[in-house]
Image (cartoon, rainbow, N blue to C red):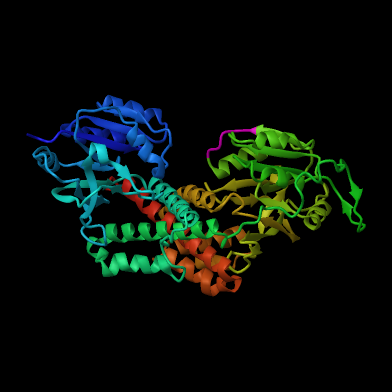
Amino acid sequence: MSARVAVLILGDERAEEVAEAVRHAAPLGEVFVLDGVGSAPVREAAGAAGARVVEDPTRGHWSKRNAALAALPEIDAEWLLLLRPDERVTPALVKEVGGLEPGDAAGYEVAVRTLFLGRRIRAGGFRRRHTVRLVRRAGARFDDEQARPSLKIEGEPKRLRSPLLHVRREGIRAMLARAVREAQDEADGYSLRLARGRKPRRPVGRCFGATRHFLRRFVLQGGFIDGRAGFHLAMTEANRRYMSRVLIDERTGRIQHEPGTTRAVGSQRSASVPTGEFASGTGKRLFPLSVLILTRDEEANIADCLSHLSFSDDVVVFDSLSTDRTIELSRSFTNVSIVSRKFDNWSSHQNWGVRNIRFRHPWVLYVDADERVDDQLAEELQSLADPDSPFAAVRMRRKDMFMGRWIRHATLYPTWLVRMFRPEKIRYERLVNPVAIVEGETARAEGHLIHYPFSKGTVQWFDRHNSYSSFEAEEMLKVLAGERRKLRRLLSRDPNERRAVAKDLFYRMPLRPQVKWLYYMFWKQAWMDGWPGITYARMQYLYEYMISIKARELRRVRDGGIV
């Protein structure tokens, strides 16, 4: 008598992967898809492939999925095989499971083989890994781990000889986004264990823990045998564990972010807004200027940012269709107007803004929502906003804040950014981190913008730089496809030309992530900023790795190769 088997696929947002997993699992028996993300495309794809969709009201909280398992409909099956969307049931496994006889086994472990970058991974800790996947329907339950939970059974499991295939073929950006979510789950699980009085296991140690993990995977466990695929798989796993380490430090208070404010929110709303030329308390002649802020879902920052801009009677919030309370909060300020446009890329978006928004004053100050203009800088910029000034733009520096302090050495300080300009004299280039091209001379302001890049938390920083790195990879390929810039242009008086030559040189270097980390740590002396500087330098290493692997992916896609 053959075993009666049902298959449960723990669905996520990957509709095509879910549908393919259903097709490979169908020969075993009835297939269910647990919809953990509320995705209509996933439900449609699963239904079209012949599966029954079961709604997961916990929306993907692994530690609560036991309730979802209990809610499965009654089925005529003794056994339940659990799969992820990127796992495939092999014909050999179908044959072996179908031939199982009723017995005393509580469950079965199944080997999982990994396919990555078009090849089977044989080493690096990713060789055939056995996990409990086939369990009796009545006894299926997960443990209470938040990240990567495992099935628990009563008694010792037996092993099946035939494997599952874990096919990792999603794009690099999606893979990195998944790594961020898994790191967040690990950090949540760590906090949950602490709350329950249990000793949690740290994903990596603080002293080069991610580096040690990579070396263990790639060197000691033989990941080098799998070549480039083994390198990138070991690197991705090490980076995921490092992100977990940073998020755990954030959860436990070792990393504390300032709220991004030096002034009480709303304290300037009732202040009188200047509308013409006037004199400051120090006797300086001050002029009115407009302000431009680019926003998208900046509820956490926008009110405090606007409270620091009460010196202007023309603040324009240029919004990219926010879905939170950004617009609502902005409208509570009497000196603010709203302009909305769908975001495409940074240079196109900013060029549209300076060309199409009708500003009230000749000079415009551009700030991000996570930046603050203090009183000293505000007065200096107003003194430079003379309509009769011979300058076309003003450059200024920025102080980046992390863990409650200015990380002077762990950043590219002092970088002089064009942030105040005459709209008709400026345009932007590059898809991300746009370069301002100014027609005319520029002046310099001695004050600083105060920048809080972690005001919305570390997860948002990782997500944002996952997006930035996709644009940066495209820019990198454009540079590499063009002519080499002459090194003597590094001595040019034009800062944009110097930056372009430096970018050209850096993009052609091998081991760029490692070079960037060494540059920050030892040339810029990030260690002088203490633990915040060391942590930020490592995060910049991760950002550069994102750019490198995405550029390789784009190049292979364009050449028709395997990603």
* Residue 490 visible from this viewpoint: yes
Counting the numbered discs, the total is 0
Left or right: 488 with respect to 438?
left
Left or right: 532 with respect to 242?
right
Magenta region, residue range: 340-344
Position in image of residue 274 (x %, y %)? 87, 43
Q: Is residue 27 magenta?
A: no
Position in image of residue 479 (x %, y %)? 45, 54
Q: Main secondary structure of the magenta part?
A: loop
Left or right: 382 with respect to 502?
right
The residue depicted at 64 percent of the width and 60 percent of the height is 401
Q: Quadrant of residue 314?
A: top right
The residue depicted at 44 percent of the width and 55 percent of the height is 547
The residue depicted at 72 percent of the width and 46 percent of the height is 304
* Residue 356 visible from this viewpoint: no
The residue depicted at 16 percent of the width and 46 percent of the height is 105
